[in-house]
Amino acid sequence: MTLTTDNPASKPVETRTPVLQARRLVKTFGQVVGLDGVSLELYPGEVLAIIGDNGAGKSTLIKCLTGAEIPDEGEIFLDGQPVHFKRPQDARSAGIETVYQNLAVSPALDVASNLFLGREERRKGILGSVFRMMDTKGMRKKAKAELAALGITTLQDVTVPVENLSGGQRQAVAVARAAAFGSKVVVLDEPTAALGVRESNQVLELIKNLRDRGIPVILISHNMPHVFEVADRIHIQRLGKRAATITPASHSMTEAVAIMTGAKRIGNSDE
Ligand SMILES: Nc1ncnc2c1ncn2[C@@H]1O[C@H](COP(=O)(O)OP(=O)(O)OP(=O)(O)O)[C@@H](O)[C@H]1O
């Protein structure tokens, strides 16, 4: 990490280019202000958590970053270049993969088919080009390799329909799908919300593996212990603004909650 301390306020200044950056995003819904000038930076090799009370603007922020909403004002940069996503497919094509809580997997399809959903590979030669036959064997082999690379050991058989898997295993498939195929950024919306303790721990390990493989992660979560376990930095949303960006080392969970609710204010907010 490149940090300098020679700015007037003698606060550390980040000199690296963020992988993904938002500058002063504004999004209104009629009279309701969803985002009120929010900035965010995601740096290479980090897990950035976004926390905030209900209605603080977490989902709206993520939607703007992933093409599901178009901000009214503000700018978004990917690898330092301005981007203007009009729909989720634009963000996906640019390498931003999002795993939403509910629509993450197709239950009737097997693990390998889910990993390759929308990117199916055809057989070589005339069987693929004319008869449009899928390269099922090849995709299964690659799916296994991808799961192994992510350290996912709970999915031995990639031919099992996803509806037969546990909640944690399904989430692992969804995350693996987002992480595969050279994605630049993975956004996870409440990935542990519906999971038990053991399954949550597996997903948290998976998030750490993604980061260790060089894929930065944005994690939205209401679960403070999970956030404090995996996040390198924590962006706190409050009333449509960034109230602060902290780290698990700089602040306690109690302080994070106090900032979230407005009981405590600190210097680096956009408010
Ligand atoms: N499509 C929409 N139409 C109208 N208002 C909306 C819409 N989407 C979000 N809002 C409003 O914008 C504000 C921010 O909502 P948002 O869903 O981003 O918050 P959140 O932090 O994700 O909350 P939660 O934790 O409850 O999911 C809220 O006041 C919400 O009611």
Image (spheres, helix red, strand yellow):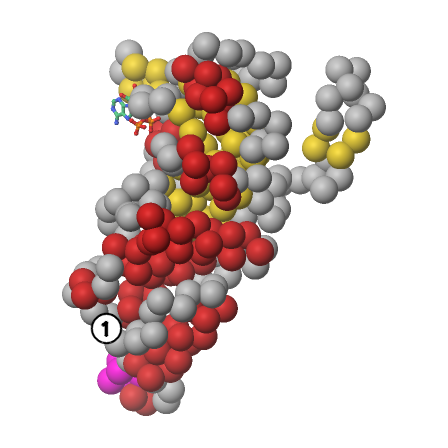
The percent coordinates of residue 158 (x first, y second) are 31, 74
Mark count: 1
Q: 92 and 137: which one is in front? A: 137
Give the left or right position of residue 251, taking residue 196 as reference: right
Give the left or right position of residue 65, taking residue 200 as reference: right
Q: 154 and 86: which one is in front? A: 154
The percent coordinates of residue 94 (x first, y second) are 48, 51
Question: Where does the magenta region start and end?
Answer: 128-133
As displayed, is residue 182 above or below residue 186? below
Q: Tell which residue pokes out farthest to the front in this image.
A: 197
Query: For residue 248, which quarter of the picture?
Result: top right
- What residue is drawn where x is 60% and y is 48%? 45
As displayed, is residue 263 above or below residue 133? above
- Residue beneath disc 1: 160
- What residue is drawn where x is 30% and y is 76%? 157
Q: Tell which residue pokes out farthest to the bottom in this image.
A: 126
Query: For residue 118, which quarter of the picture?
Result: bottom left
As displayed, is residue 183 above or below residue 221? below
Query: For residue 152, which quarter of the picture?
Result: bottom left
The percent coordinates of residue 166 (x first, y second) are 24, 59
Q: Is 82 included in the stretch rendered in magenta?
A: no
Callout 1 crowding tier (Cα within 10 Å): few <14, some 14–19, many ≥20? some
As displayed, is residue 245 above or below residue 143? above
User: Main SS type for the magenta part?
Assistant: loop
Could you tell me if residue 86 is visible in this image?
A: no
The percent coordinates of residue 267 (x first, y second) are 61, 14
The answer as to whether callout 1 falls within 8 Å of ligand 1 is no
Amino acid under label 1?
Val
- What residue is drawn where x is 51% and y is 20%? 255
Q: Is 129 included in the stretch rendered in magenta?
A: yes
Q: Quadrant of the N terminus?
A: top right
